[in-house]
Image (cartoon, rainbow, N blue to C red):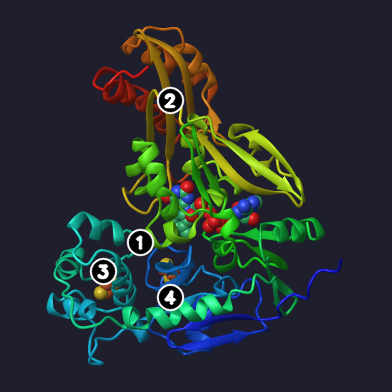
Amino acid sequence: MTAPTPRPYIRFRLNDREVRRDTVAASDTLLDFLRLDQRLTGSKEGCAEGDCGACTVLVGRLVAGALVYEPVNACIRFLASLDGCHVVTIEHLRGPDGGLHPVQQAMVDHHGSQCGFCTPGIVMALYALWMRVPQPTRREVEVALQGNLCRCTGYRPILDAAMSIKAAGEDILAAERAAVTAQLMAWRDGARVAVARDGSRAILPGDVDDLAAVLEAEPEARVIAGATDVGLWVTKHLRALPVAVFVGHLEGLKEIAESDDAIRLGAGVTYAEAEGAMGAAFPHLGPFFERIAGWQVRSMGTIGGNIANGSPIGDMPPVLIALGATITLRKGATRRELALEEFFVDYGKQDRAPGEFVEAITVPKPGGLNAAYKVSKRRDEDISTVAAGIHLRVTEGRIVAARIAYGGMAAVPQRARAAEAALVGQPLGEAAFEAAAGALAGEFTPLSDMRASAAYRMRVAQNLLRRFWIEEGAGGEVAA
Ligand SMILES: Cc1cc2nc3c(=O)[nH]c(=O)nc-3n(C[C@H](O)[C@H](O)[C@H](O)COP(=O)(O)OP(=O)(O)OC[C@H]3O[C@@H](n4cnc5c(N)ncnc54)[C@H](O)[C@@H]3O)c2cc1C
Ligand code: FES
Ligand code: FES
């Protein structure tokens, strides 16, 4: 049977109109398209790396048939990935009478803008929050703005504005919701999409089986999920993307299945999609998700991407390794299961064959005592200096099992096997954790870099074990 001909164009809704493009390079960004092609210059370019939020736009997509809008960074979002979506820019925002939207009006009333460069991005992030939570708490506003940098106004007036947004008349996206949902639904054809420009090709598989087929045929293709890593290769390192396979739209990679024993996450599940289920199943992970990037990046970046990139400072691998997670790798119709720690072979080297992709992550629910720690220079929107996941099982006051993993301490996310051995069999007490902290020094040789010295990293890693004892062991409930 011959494969059907791919659809040779992408189509999406931009504000109130349809856009179709057949000449699109894999590396074309949404922000360049908006500003240079469409002359929609309300979205700004500040950092071009997902950090400042000046380029924030909303992307609406169908999730189980319902239209969901999320804030994203247009600077690192690739245009091809928007097929079948609704892109909403600041130019679309207005009040029911054509004047200022209540979010914009609140920013004016509370003097939330000075130079104005950050303002469109802040308004879009607040608009996304207001659509979900019309009367947010101050903490909810702070979390929603983690990915938005304001250099001159300061955050107090912006927070005041956010807290005072009024509902007024029918909101523009609420008014359009039924029509947009119908349009996006009608566009769902399940087809593979293939577009190209200047020798750079973008492929959007029709489903997960099609993804497997595409990668078997083109094993050198770059998989792109949320593009929160790959986007920077293009905008910061000016790397070319000769052929890219986009997977962020594949519902088959977005399934979250929970049983009594485990949670299985499709590799394409984003942080924002994972945090509800993961936070409920693993209460220690709830606050941890808020420490990862900002809302825009959490709306795009995937757990699978955080693993597949092989970074020694990715935040999810240490905490997932500590919980005993496994990953499912797939090549064609063949799947294999791997303990997550075994996936990381060496710096820049993972146990993944050409044409193979990460399909899912299975996280057991091991019970016991668990913690996830992240130490970074800034509390919000920062990469870890050291991250740690710790799991302990205690029976009758004695430690019977331990899994500890660190990020930022070696060339790969790594288990602390000597520290684990120092704990197992010992009475749950300070002495055991002191012994484990001592054992760390023998098994890790961290690097010094711009984030921290080797000595600092080691001290932090050891102190996290002491913290675990104080917070979870001595003071916490001792679970069997
Ligand atoms: C501003 C900013 C802040 C950030 N903050 C944090 C942070 O606090 N903590 C943190 O850990 N990370 C952080 N990151 C990094 C990034 O967000 C994460 O690593 C993210 O999880 C990557 O996922 P993605 O879907 O965007 O990956 P992509 O960029 O799409 O891909 C990353 C790599 O994984 C590969 N890949 C993706 N999916 C698959 C798959 N299913 N199978 C095989 N290969 C695949 C790609 O080919 C590529 O090599 C930040 C990034 C930015 C821009
Ligand atoms: S320009 Fe800074 S996040 Fe996009
Ligand atoms: S108003 Fe100038 S950066 Fe925020």
Report, in whole angstroms, how far the alpha carbon at label 4 lies from the one at label 1: 14 Å
Q: Nearer the viewer's eye, disc 4 or disc 1? A: 1
Judged from the image, the secondary structure of the residue bearing numbered disc 3 is helix
Instruction: Please state, as top left, top right, bottom left or bottom right, where the N terminus lies in the image.
Output: bottom right
Residue 411, horizontal then vertical, whole percent? 58, 37
Q: Which numbered marker is on residue 398?
A: none
Q: Residue 311's image quarter?
A: top right
User: Disc 3 designates what residue?
Assistant: 130
The residue lying toward the viewer, choosing from 197 and 461, is 197
x 32%, y 11%: residue:
429
Report, in whole angstroms, how far the alpha carbon at label 3 lies from the one at label 1: 16 Å
User: Disc 2 designates what residue?
Assistant: 391
Asked if residue 163 lies left or right of residue 378, the reply is: left
Q: Nearer the viewer's eye, disc 2 or disc 4? A: 2
Report, in whole angstroms, how far the alpha carbon at label 1 lies from the one at label 2: 30 Å
The tag earlier along the polypeptide, 1 or 2, is: 1
Residue 243, horizontal then vertical, whole percent? 72, 67
Give the residue type that dot 1 points to: Gly
User: Disc 4 designates what residue?
Assistant: 45
Q: Nearer the viewer's eye, disc 4 or disc 3? A: 3
Report, in whole angstroms, how far the alpha carbon at label 2 lies from the one at label 3: 37 Å
Give the residue type that dot 2 points to: His
